């Protein structure tokens, strides 16, 4: 006999009191913490518990009794289903306040180190259409909203181009409009979707690994002065198993080239693997260049289909200005730029340094970094590709010199302990730590505390309407 499913409680007239991790808010009910998406502090709601442990629960709001004065009207039709931009319902000034609090709490509770006064967060001038890169997934398993579940949906309506539903790897929400990028992105995505449906092209099935259309990546570069789109890259990803599909692929690419002359770089990848990563696959150019050019303070940066580049270009400029200011360069310093990517920070600070050495894991990114130095006439940079913990060691420092300043911008996981040990061995006068995850940054700062003190902290909002926040910290070598 099947076990009877335990009935989960309905919590009535609960006041939301704070924000929590992953863009959720929280309430306290007796001794239990309840995590709730798509609500804001001050909302009074009925909560249907979906999952319950001893000291916490996860719930959804099923009825609003009072709306918080902190609430903002969501502007996206997909809000609440998509899983992105979860803070649209929270006023932007409140988003900034909570991000500031997130940085303070992480550095204080996890770092447990002496801190200076933390500077007010730098908000983003643009809060919509601020991204320069988006990726969309093709799927033959469209996610159905609650309203659609009760309708008679035919199989030929199940194709989708959009974003993965959180917690459902094989389901994709069909996106009609997204406000994260310029509207040209919506036209291209929807136009390709309509063409594919009309021509009977197959959309990928993540479970059976069948289907031709897999993924679409769009990148754009703005004119720095005009604030208009200067260059546009689209990379299509296909699974091709027979000659007929190759013909269909070429016809689709030609349709895209004819329909959107704005596309300056139209590329494609044939990916017959079981995942969508393209780092180990060749990228073919169908039309135009194999890259776009981003500009920052007069510098040009080549960005290819595999390149890492900050996805909020305008706010990245402010972030890098903070990093350069914290570095305190006079023109005589040897700078190590760890996790350099395409050398953006390295080239950005090179004018004020004697030499900059950049290290990065992705070989293609390092090649772009070298090109970026060359096209800007910068001759005081060196770049090395490889795993940070393997390259950055005592032998490397003995060969290339002990750095005066280290700038580090690691991935969300933070720095490997071996890298931290090498930094402590190198003993630069200053360390500028740029982080997209204040929690792992705080952990690393506590390890560096044996020789360094934190003297400046500057949070920067790169991703409005999300819980993500960047943070820049200056560490200076302790005396004695």
Image: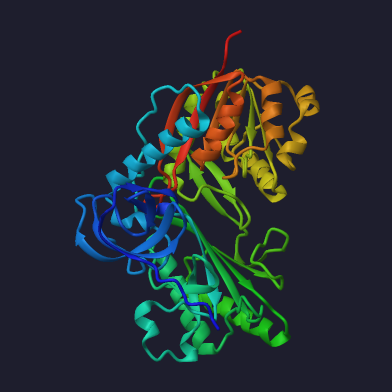
| Above or below 156: residue 434 | above
Task: Identify the colour scheme used.
Answer: rainbow
| Above or below 251: residue 35 | above
| Above or below 169: residue 227 | above
- Left or right of 215, for residue 79: left
Counting from the top left corner in percent of width and height, residue 206 is at 61, 75
Task: Say if residue 224 shows up in the picture.
Answer: yes
Q: Quadrant of residue 424?
A: top right
- The residue closer to the viewer here, 94 or 407, is 94
Counting from the top left corner in percent of width and height, residue 466 is at 40, 52
| Above or below 66: residue 453 | above
Q: Residue at x 59, y 84 (%)?
A: 202
- Left or right of 289, for residue 147: left
Q: Quadrant of residue 8?
A: bottom left
- Left or right of 122, for residue 193: right
Counting from the top left corner in percent of width and height, residue 4 is at 48, 77
Counting from the top left corner in percent of width and height, residue 321 is at 46, 32
- Left or right of 197, for residue 274: right
Task: Say if residue 227 shows up in the picture.
Answer: no
Q: Where's the N terminus, which quadrant?
A: bottom right
Q: Residue at x 54, y 50 (%)?
A: 293
Q: Quadrant of residue 269?
A: bottom right
């Amino acid at each position: 006999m099947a076990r009877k499913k335990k009935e989960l409680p309905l919590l009535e007239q609960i006041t939301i009191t704070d924000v929590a991790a992953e863009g959720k808010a929280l309430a306290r009910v007796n001794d239990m913490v309840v995590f709730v998406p798509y609500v804001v502090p001050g909302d009074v709601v009925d909560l249907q518990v979906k999952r319950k442990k001893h000291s916490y629960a996860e719930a959804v709001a099923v009825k609003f009794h009072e709306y918080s004065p902190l609430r903002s009207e969501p502007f996206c039709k997909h809000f609440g289903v998509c899983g992105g931009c979860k803070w649209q319902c929270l006023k932007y000034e409140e988003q900034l306040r909570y991000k500031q609090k997130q940085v303070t709490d992480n550095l204080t509770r996890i770092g447990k180190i002496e801190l200076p006064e933390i500077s007010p967060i730098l908000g983003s001038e643009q809060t919509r259409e601020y991204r320069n890169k988006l990726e969309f997934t093709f799927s033959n398993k469209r996610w159905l909203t609650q309203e659609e579940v009760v309708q008679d949906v035919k199989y030929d309506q199940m194709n989708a181009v959009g974003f993965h539903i959180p917690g459902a790897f094989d389901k994709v929400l069909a996106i009609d409009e997204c406000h994260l990028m310029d509207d040209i992105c919506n036209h291209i995505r929807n136009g390709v979707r309509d063409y594919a449906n009309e021509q009977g092209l197959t959309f990928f099935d993540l479970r059976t690994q069948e289907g031709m259309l897999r993924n679409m990546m769009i990148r754009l570069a703005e004119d720095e002065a005009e604030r208009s789109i200067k260059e546009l890259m689209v990379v299509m990803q296909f699974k091709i198993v027979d000659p007929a599909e190759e013909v269909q692929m070429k016809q689709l690419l030609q349709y895209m080239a004819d329909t959107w002359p704005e596309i300056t770089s139209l590329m494609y990848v044939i990916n017959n693997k079981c995942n969508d990563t393209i780092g180990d696959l060749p990228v073919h150019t169908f039309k135009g260049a194999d890259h776009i050019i981003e500009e920052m303070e007069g510098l040009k940066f080549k960005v290819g289909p595999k390149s890492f580049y900050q996805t909020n270009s305008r706010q990245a400029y402010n972030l890098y200005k903070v990093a350069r200011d914290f570095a305190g360069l006079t023109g005589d310093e040897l700078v190590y730029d760890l996790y350099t990517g395409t050398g953006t920070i390295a080239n950005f600070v090179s004018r004020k340094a004697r030499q900059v050495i950049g290290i990065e894991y992705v070989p293609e990114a390092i090649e772009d970094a070298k090109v970026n130095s060359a096209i800007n006439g910068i001759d005081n940079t060196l770049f090395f590709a490889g795993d940070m913990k393997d390259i950055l060691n005592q032998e490397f420092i003995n060969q290339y010199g002990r750095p005066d300043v280290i700038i580090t911008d690691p991935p969300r996981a933070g720095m490997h302990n071996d890298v931290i040990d090498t930094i402590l061995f190198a003993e630069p006068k200053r360390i500028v730590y740029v982080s997209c995850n204040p929690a792992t940054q705080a952990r690393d700062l506590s390890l560096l505390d044996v020789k360094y003190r934190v003297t400046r902290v500057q949070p920067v909002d790169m991703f409005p309407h999300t819980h993500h926040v960047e943070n820049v910290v200056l560490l200076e070598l302790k005396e004695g």
